[in-house]
Amino acid sequence: MTDPMLPPASTAMGAEPVIPAASPPDRPSLPPGRWIRENLFPNTRNSILTIFAILIALFAYRGLLNFMFSEERSWIAVRTNLRLMFTQAYPEHQYIRVWVTVGTIMVLAGVSAGIWARWGGVTVKRLMGWLMSGGVLTAAGVLVREPSVLTDAAGESVRDDAGELVRESFAAAMADRWVWWAIAIALLALGLVLWTSLDDLRRRTIEIPVAWLIFGLPALLVASTWVVRYGHYGFTEGEFIAEPGQLVAMTTRVPWTFMWLILVASFALGRAARDRAIASAQAAEETPNGGPSDEGADDDAVPELPRGALARTRTSVNLLWVLSPFFLYWVVMRDPEIDYAHVFSTMLPMGLAFGAAGAAVLWLLTRSDAGEVGRLAAIGLLLLAAFHWVAAYFGWYSMLQVARIAFLLLAVAGLLAPNFAGVAAQRRRLVGAWLFMVLIAFYGATVINSPSTVETPTDMFIGGFSVTLLVSVLTIMLSFPIGVLLALARTSRQPIFRVLSTIYIEVIRGVPLITLLLFFSGVLPLFLPDGMELAELAAAILGYTLFSAAYLAENVRGGLQSIRRGQYEAADAVGLTTTQRTGFIVLPQSLRVSIPPLVGQVIATFKETSLLAIIGLFDFLRMANSVIPNQSQFLGVRRENLLFVSVVYWVVAFAMSKYSQRLEQRVGLGQR
Amino acid sequence: MSTQPAHGDATIAVSDELAARDDMIVCREVDKWFGDFQALSGISATIKEQEIVVVLGPSGSGKSTWIRCINRLEAHQSGQIIVDGIELTNDLRNIEKIRSEVGMVFQQFNLFPHLTVLDNITLAPIWVRKKSRPEAEELAESLLERVGIPEQAQKFPGQLSGGQQQRVAIARALAMEPRVMLFDEPTSALDPEMIKEVLDVMEELARSGMTMMVVTHEMGFAREVADRIIFMEEGEIVEVGTPHHFFTEPAEERTKLFLSQVL
Ligand SMILES: Nc1ncnc2c1ncn2[C@@H]1O[C@H](COP(=O)(O)OP(=O)(O)O)[C@@H](O)[C@H]1O
Ligand SMILES: [Mg+2]
């Protein structure tokens, strides 16, 4: 619970070793034996409870191990189908696109981590705890797992006369598992050696940078693929390959090694950018905040520097994150075949016309004397934009979808215009934003409407984990603004907004997600205007978005209600408009308050994408549950896949939840 | 007000019929109800440019309600309030205009906890006054200097003491370069040892020629700094006078009773 932004404790002491504020220095840690006695077996009652709990845990552990290592398991199904589960049947010769996508995500993740992350360190004590627990768990596993079934010369399981499987003796089993014993002993020994070679203060104060762990463990994994013979399994051009004792295929090893390098390099790049910005800011300020300069202090003490070059870098990285799904999905994965004749004859001229005309309109609307006339004009634009959609519904006249969208965007920009009025720099900013939006809209429309050149056996070229990821990312990105708007509407003073948003939220929350999905994939197309089609995937994303927005809205509303009246009054008193008050004062504070429920909703959305199977998409779960069990080689193999899929879901969800905890701590500063 | 042109920014005219030229705040027969409860009844008062007016009165007498009506944090139901020649009506533009001319300091500071001190101060100048960021920051730094805490610019409000927070709040209000400053019990939430540092800032502000309306229980400040004292009770103005008159020869029984309780 150290406050990362408060430098006092760690920097003021200065002398090394730096004592983290979280652990009071005067209470030495107990030796393991005493710790166990005092915490697990302090008195009879607790001892009984402890033993009981340990027995239950061991029982469950044994069940899991017996399941995983049973001779009946065919993990080979999972190993063979890894690519299928993550990318469905993406064509082999186009696989470079998958790697470009993963690589882009690695670059963004690495740079973002470099710029933002304040990971800090893990004390040696905790590390030793992990090592020793790992050793104990491994040893316990070796002991509790049932002895293996004997096999005959042909590799068949041996059965006795009653048809029961014959297992080796306990002693033989223990001897057979010598590798595991070695691992257990190595872990325990490493932990103990570290323990005895350091005194207590050092154990609690020496820290291993978390970055080492975060990059080091994948490094070990990647490096091991070059050495350890994991075996080579897969479907290559429809051919089933199973080569136990081989190294992992080159086409797996090399790209992942690259990915790791890219990740680390981008991290270093982001870190360097951050350090340079901080250094130049400190040089400019001479003595920052009158405190002793905190050189040598770890990442936690670096003050936030929201301005200047760093702020610009952060904004652009954020923007790239927002744009990347659209770019990666529609451009990289889909490889659209763009009809250049249409682009030059229609899209380009139309885009230019919209850009120029819109810029002129916005320039007029942001004149300092636009006043009430300007507001009326913006409302007029909104009505015009709305009319185009109504007309589309009744089929009065035809118009490209992108034009309708552009009109709508212009109306929104027009409504925002008063906030940018008067000052030339601000006016230019609004016009620039408009031109950027036009560019995105027309480019996006061109790309989306071009047919894909990627050929797959099914009509979907994306499936498995990628579709799970795509749907969750787009859903979260789209539902967030909608949710915030709904929450604002529900707390607004305008009764009409309040009523509409309340009805919407309550209706959606009262309907099962499945019905919404079925509705959007099956029923909605009947209601759509002429000539408008909704791909299955888009329908699914729409359904998820509308569903998730209602829940997000309720979470945001909780945050909105926690803002005290004084904040509104202070914002009013300095003359902020309602929009500015909402954007600068109310929303930032309420979103901070609602981080835990918001992340909860994000995690729920991610998990609920497993319902995609019901409307016919091949998501991650469906691959495991119905695609693999139908392959001729692995008929009926299902439980292994399900376990694997659950672990992947869990890892992602757990990472998000951990991240949210850190985020909460970090922004906790603003709240007194 | 119907004579005003419907557009333009510099066109809200100082009309002579509304108020004299050096009248900064004019209240005429202002009434304010909260439901059935009348919080202000028939408040009439004029505050001249550069005048320091202290409003005294027992708790619940309507001091806050009145001062909050002046920048429209509360809406009055009848009577006229004219600030710097602009009458407060439901017209949003008038309200925005007046709010940017009137600075307000609250009892509970009401700083924005998620913004640094510097951002607290520069937010409104940048977005309402349309100043550039460097310009606004320069202004903020000079104001922080003026209220005596130049070294706290990068901290968050939660990291400051109450007295420092209130001084930041004063700087935030001053950053809008207001023509009037309203103070609603600025020292009531402070520990005794911090009261003086805030009062010192307010005194300096008064000497610099700012028009100020101050609700306070600090009798010393009222006696030393005020040009006039207005005494309120139960939503009415009971007595108005110079500090000398007020503390030595109050005319009204209710004033005497109040003074005997607080002095
Ligand atoms: N929002 C409100 N709703 C209802 N009554 C209010 C409200 N604000 C103030 N009052 C009442 O109006 C009266 C005057 O309050 P106030 O102006 O805060 O007094 P003072 O600041 O002089 O202590 C009090 O009786 C108070 O209870
Ligand atoms: Mg009060």
Image (cartoon, coloured by chain):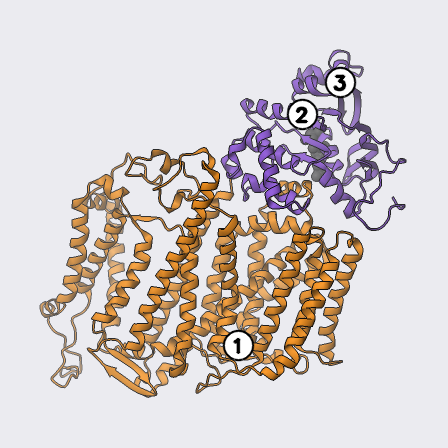
Chain colours: A orange, B purple
Whether marks 2 and 1 lie on the same chain: no
Q: Nearer the viewer, mark 1 or mark 3?
A: 1
Residue at 17% across / 62% down in the picture? A183
Question: Is label 2's Cβ within 8 Å of ligand 2?
Answer: no
Q: Is residue B112 visible?
A: no
Q: How far from the left and from the top, in percent, is residue A17?
A: 28, 39
| Crowding near the residue tagged with mark 1, few <14, some 14–19, many ≥20 C-alpha atoms within 10 Å | some
| Crowding near the residue tagged with mark 2, few <14, some 14–19, many ≥20 C-alpha atoms within 10 Å | many
Quadrant housing the N terminus of chain B: top right
Q: How far from the left and from the top, in percent, is residue B129?
A: 68, 44
Residue at 52% across / 49% down in the picture? A308
Mark 1 and mark 3: span between their CA atoms? 76 Å
* Residue hosting label 2: B216
Chain ID for label 3? B
* Residue hosting label 3: B255
Amino acid, disc 2: Thr
Q: Nearer the viewer, mark 3 or mark 2?
A: 2
Mark 2 and mark 1: span between their CA atoms? 64 Å
Chain ID for label 1? A
Q: Is residue A635 left or right of residue A344?
A: left
Judging depth in this view, the residue of A496 and A301 nearest the camera is A301
Amino acid, disc 1: Leu
* Residue hosting label 1: A537
Q: Is residue A432 visible?
A: yes
